Amino acid sequence: MPSPQPPAGRPTSKDVAKHAGVSQSTVSLVLADKWRGRVSATTVEAVRDAASALGYRPNTSARSLRLGRTHTVMLVVPVLTSPFFGAVHTGAAQVAAERDFGVVVYPTRDGVDLTPNPFSSAAIDGVLASSMAAEPLDVLRSAGPGTEDLPLVMLDSEPGRGVPTVNDDVADGMRALAEYLVDLGHRRVARLRSAVQSWTFRARDEAFRAALGPAEVVAEAHAPLTLDGGRTAALALLASPARPTVLVCDDDLQAAGAYKAARALGRRVPRDVSVTGFGDLRYARVVEPELTTVCLPAVELGARGMTALLDLLDTGDAGPDVVLPGELLVRGSTAPPASG
Amino acid sequence: MPSPQPPAGRPTSKDVAKHAGVSQSTVSLVLADKWRGRVSATTVEAVRDAASALGYRPNTSARSLRLGRTHTVMLVVPVLTSPFFGAVHTGAAQVAAERDFGVVVYPTRDGVDLTPNPFSSAAIDGVLASSMAAEPLDVLRSAGPGTEDLPLVMLDSEPGRGVPTVNDDVADGMRALAEYLVDLGHRRVARLRSAVQSWTFRARDEAFRAALGPAEVVAEAHAPLTLDGGRTAALALLASPARPTVLVCDDDLQAAGAYKAARALGRRVPRDVSVTGFGDLRYARVVEPELTTVCLPAVELGARGMTALLDLLDTGDAGPDVVLPGELLVRGSTAPPASG
DNA sequence: ATTATTCAGTCATACGTATGACTCCCGATC
DNA sequence: GATCGGGAGTCATACGTATGACTGAATAAT
């Protein structure tokens, strides 16, 4: 006949208390490091010993219930398969882990908006949202009651709209790129832009055009940030009667597609036409010739964004908007234009 | 003088109860769909109306505390920046969302093992772990007390060790690849393998060798699954005195590196040397010529894995081990060996 | 010697939900 | 007329934690 099992589930603070010969409150105090002036050093020691002896880990649900905070935030990204957003996630997750926060990632599937409502199933203290198609505030508002005032930090979004932002300095990168191309001698530029018209893409384009000086954009197309999107659009641009000498893409993967278009048309990169990308996570160095591109600090973007969000949660202030510098990486896909 | 604010936080089941003129229990019963035989149809209606009128969403922490289950699982992957694991995540997240589970992702950083203990900060009902360097069971055991018996499903791990698995049929893909290469006329094969020696890589290699027939592996190297890892190792393999006519890589990114090595040595792909990859998420079609590779159904892998895990949680049974077919995709990087 | 202060803890309660045990009422059965 | 059965709900409690209010003893100040 089996003796009545002691529960033997995960140990609770009560178990620790019993083991250390104190009350549950004391355990809680000690483990929350709020015992100064309330508990003696020897008791603190005893509680700590008991806790580690039993392998005690506080119950997250109970703590969340009590404190009204879940210690979990949501990261909103367009897709999960992009190395760029993977890197953003990496940076964000690292900071979150250091500050003992969990991260749940929600993919918007590239513009398809938030359905089903992701906030319904997860208990979230805040949101770190990166470049979305719709206005972030609208998105949150439409996500159901109780979410309007969820603390929010935006990545790569327009500053100064009442939401803290952490951005790449896309403008600076594009400016450097424009100046470099002009110096090479390019005057007729084709632009292969993103199909989705979010702020960050508009900002890039404006900065680029503003820095073109003697050169001008003679052809332009919009396409998804994919290999095939880039290839198809580039096919048209390269055949443009305006005869652009360089193709400036909004994304490295688009640029890789442009390579294929150029090849299909019998044009050599960079001899017959130069190509540039944007982003530089993985693709830029895979292709041949390696791609001249603007490198964005994706890991740091995620890290700084998460830092701002957690600061916002802890202190009510996310700190000043952050702008991280991009960097122009000159590689093999750009050359002076073919004469003529 | 401000009137004493009604709390005005998120509405609770008690608020719904008051609004509907019933007790909190009744609300709970109705919303959990357990009212049959206990609540009349009209009351059910009233409760539902009140709930949606107030925008009530149950408090996840309280529910978790009460039920002892968090409705959250952890997905363990080597890295976050890989399109392959991004796709696994996509599939897993989708299934989880459908069954109202949250997913938190934990990256092991490619073999660096689980530190700090990820299970301490998150409250988790189960783990879906994909190809890790260490034995999964050891990893879980070492993750601290209380985690040894966490429900677990493994992706791409050896079946029959007491843990439910969901695998790609890597063996079949490799067999098809070997036969294809032999048919092309290749006899001297170089193998560029993963640096980490987990089961899935061993299984691939064994299947490949077993199907080689008249051909044989004349050179072999281990390297990280990166561009530079592939390039460096391929440089040595291609210079091997055994003069392999084809380079079979464990990963598409490695294969892209091999392209660069070949180019550096003045060898053309596929005229002078054929190259094959493995995985096929994004990189395989970016490179030129496009890569002959074995395509793995990453999204479905994640989806089936999550399905198995949630079944395990719900019914105590994960169902039979799953094996998903891989597919040989013949593209431009393979050709008959150069004569001689 | 009395009062005030500090120290070292404990008590009790609340967070929001889910559920077994209970009550009450009305119609049917014996 | 007394008993039963079941329909329609409510009550009370537990989950594990955190914390403001309290207590008792010892020490310091007056």
Image (cartoon, coloured by chain):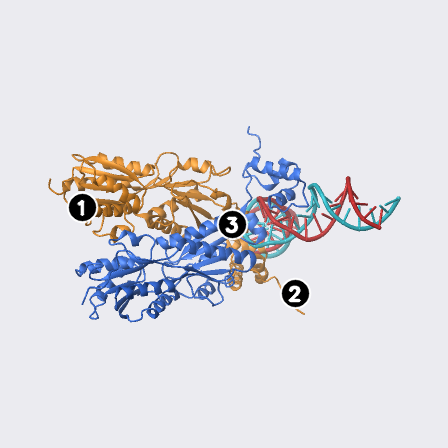
Chain colours: A blue, B orange, C cyan, D red
Give SS at disc 3: loop
What label does residue A99 carry, if any? 3
In the figure, residue C26 lies in which quadrant?
A: bottom right
Q: Which residue is drawn at 60% across and 41% down?
A: A13
Q: Mark 3 lies on which chain?
A: A
Q: Position of residue C11 (x, y in %)?
A: 70, 45
Query: Marks 2 and 1: in contact by CB < 8 Å?
Result: no
Q: Distance between the residues labelled 3 and 1?
A: 51 Å
The residue positioned 22% from the left and 62% from the top of the image is A273
x, y (%) of residue D25?
77, 40
Q: Do labels 1 and 2 share a chain?
A: yes
> Label 2 amino acid?
Pro
Do marks 3 and 1 share a chain? no
Element carrying mark 2: loop
Report the front residue among B65 and A323.
Answer: A323
Note whether A307 is above or below B75 in the view shown.
Answer: below
Is disc 3 in contact with disc 1, using a CB cutoff of under 8 Å? no
User: Which labelled disc corresponds to residue B4?
Assistant: 2
Which label number is shown at residue B267? 1
Q: Is residue B339 in view from this perspective?
A: yes
Image side of residue A154 versus residue A81, left or right: right
Q: How far apart are marks 1 and 2 (CA)?
A: 81 Å
Distance between the Cα atoms at labels 2 and 3? Answer: 36 Å
Q: Looking at the picture, how far across and down is residue A246, in whole percent?
A: 25, 64
Going from N to C along the chain, the mark reached first, 1 or 2, is 2
Pointer 2 local density, CA inside 10 Å: few below 14, some 14–19, many at least 20: few
